[in-house]
Image (cartoon, grey):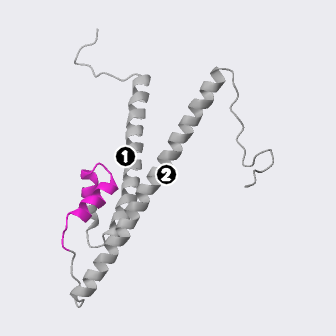
Amino acid sequence: MQSSLYPTFESEEEQIMRLSRETAAADAERARASSTDGMVDGLAHMFPEIDREVLTILLASHDGQAERVVEELTMSGAPPMQRVGESDDALALEQLQEEQELAEAVRLSTVDRYVSRVARVRAANEAKREHRLATMGLVPPVEREVSAGRPIEPV
């Protein structure tokens, strides 16, 4: 019987489990920090007038989703910082060009995500189809680029 007067010792297995949990937590924190740094770099490039610390806080408040931060910053309508010696027309033109570049980047990102999702869905559907055919004992048909017969000519 062990009394509370004596210290309790961890068994070797308990020590190994505790160390592995601590190591896994540290690895996850390092991975999250490195990916967050990359996202903050991208946001700092898009929004050079905003402090990196502010971008880091915004990214953390949006659960690490950079697209939501970009959307909030572009939709917020916050006035841009004016530079000394530049006219309002030059600033407006520069802001318009930046907005167009950002809109194009977001559009391309959306298109890329759509294309990759379509490819994943098609691959999954093809795998299901092949599995169904295999369970029935059938072989999927051969897809050919060119027909084996004579080409059909218009009359």
Q: Pick out the residue farthest to the top.
A: 1
- Determine the secondary structure under disc 1: helix
Q: Pick out the residue farthest to the bottom.
A: 85
* Residue type at the position of mark 2: Val
For residue 73, above or below residue 68: below
Q: Which quadrant of the rendered structure holds the C terminus?
A: bottom right
- Determine the secondary structure under disc 2: helix
Give the residue at mark 1: 29
Residue sitting at x 62%, y 30%: 130
* Residue type at the position of mark 1: Glu
Q: Quadrant of residue 79?
A: bottom left
Q: Which quadrant of the rendered structure holds the N terminus?
A: top left
Q: Is residue 52 left or right of residue 38?
A: left
Main SS category, magenta section: helix
Q: Is residue 86 left or right of residue 37?
A: left
Q: Is residue 71 left or right of residue 136?
A: left
Residue sitting at x 26%, y 19%: 6
Between residue 133 and residue 53, name the one nearer to us. 133
Residue sitting at x 45%, y 51%: 114
Magenta-colored span = 58-79
For residue 21, above or below residue 57: above
